[in-house]
Amino acid sequence: MQDVIIIGAGPAGLTAGLYAARAGLNTLILSGAELGGQLLLTEKIENFPGFPTASGLDLIETIRTQAESAGAKLVREQAISVDLSLRPFHVQTESSLYETQTLILATGAKARWLNIASEEKFKGRGVSICATCDGFFYRGKRVAVIGGGSSAVYEALLLMQLAKEVIIICREDHLSGDETLIKRLQETPSVQVIHNAEVMEFLGDKKVEALKILKEGQESEIALDGAFVAIGSDPDSGLVRGQLKLDEWGRIETDKLTGATSVAGVFAAGDVQQSGTRQAILAAASGCLAALSAKEFLLNPK
Ligand SMILES: Cc1cc2nc3c(=O)[nH]c(=O)nc-3n(C[C@H](O)[C@H](O)[C@H](O)COP(=O)(O)OP(=O)(O)OC[C@H]3O[C@@H](n4cnc5c(N)ncnc54)[C@H](O)[C@@H]3O)c2cc1C
């Protein structure tokens, strides 16, 4: 039996693993198929203290090595169900059933799609949610980024290094996120921002060729070669739906001082839990908190 199982291996889960192992807990991290999480979708991180510039992959590999060196065991299995009514808790993967005294949920978040009919038709045919993965195909081309928050800013910054022209379609009258990065976008002549506009439809034959937008009551079309949807993400909390208290957005409710959830012995960290801002440093910090709280719970179960 494990002292602690951590589900998820993004910055939150790996940091939880590092701290749990260093606290002497018998620690298992289930990484799922995508070890590294959302940071693997970004080529360059400039705001993680101690790493002036790092790729998402390098940062994740550094934390993973540190966690494993401290004694955390990492397996590339996906948790397919958990039973929080049993003691010890049960965690089922495709190949094994694990038992654990405490559990840390660090399953992160998944990118949101627009959910308009034509999007389905053009997914993988010019409509993407990952500039790091697909931006290369648009070298020298004209692309749109749909969204106005941090995700859109990150995607546009990456695309402006590859594409001839980047058009950001933003519903609000301003972009939000890291001001330094927004300024960099605004100062780049090949980047144009269309504010107060909503995407109605993707148009094209075999692949996307244009976007229909609605701006100030007027519909218009923008010709392009590709479009990147960057409208944020939803917490990946399906595993514990009905077993833990979630807020109206599906984020796991946690105690801010401990990371404790509504079930004693279960903690949550990173983007899957309630946090105003989604950043790697915050995910890592909450992973630390959850691990130390799990240790405290094992010493003084309540
Ligand atoms: C394009 C992009 C660029 C970004 N750039 C920056 C940046 O420059 N700076 C910054 O600070 N932040 C950035 N962020 C935000 C940052 O990546 C996230 O805040 C952070 O990764 C959240 O960490 P997390 O560990 O909570 O979750 P995630 O990174 O989402 O990791 C979740 C992990 O859980 C695993 N998982 C999910 N379900 C299961 C399951 N059932 N079983 C096993 N494993 C499971 C996943 O496979 C994954 O490994 C960016 C995000 C995006 C999308």
Image: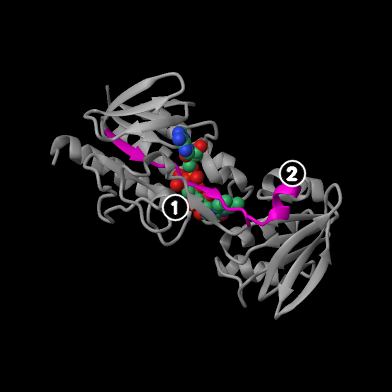
For mark 1, what is the residue? 281
Residue at disc 1, secondary structure: helix
Q: In percent of the image, x 25 and y 34: which residue is there?
A: 85
Lateral position of residue 26 relative to residue 37, left or right: left
Q: From this view, report whether residue 229 is shown above or below residue 12.
A: below
For mark 2, what is the residue? 124
Query: x and y percent of residue 133 in the render?
Result: 69, 43
Query: x and y percent of residue 237 in the render?
Result: 42, 45
Lateral position of residue 141 relative to residue 123, left or right: right
Q: Residues within 10 Å of mark 2 (few under 14, many from 20)?
A: some
Q: In percent of the image, x 43 and y 34: which residue is there?
A: 66
Where are the magenta residues, as a range? 102-124
Q: Quadrant of the C terminus?
A: top left
Query: x and y percent of residue 114 in the render?
Result: 63, 57
Lateral position of residue 218 relative to residue 44, left or right: right
Residue at disc 2, secondary structure: loop
- Looking at the rendered structure, the kind of residue marked 1 is Ile
Residue 111 is covered by the magenta coloring: yes
- Label 2 to label 1, Cα distance in Å? 31 Å
Cβ of mark 2 under 8 Å from ligand 1: the answer is: no
Cβ of mark 1 under 8 Å from ligand 1: the answer is: yes
Query: x and y percent of residue 191 in the render?
Result: 75, 67
- Looking at the rendered structure, the kind of residue marked 2 is Gly
Q: Is residue 162 visible?
A: yes
Q: From this view, report whether residue 296 is shown above or below residue 72.
A: below
Look at discs 2 and 1 and give the one toward the viewer: 2
Q: From this view, report whether residue 149 is shown above or below residue 58.
A: below
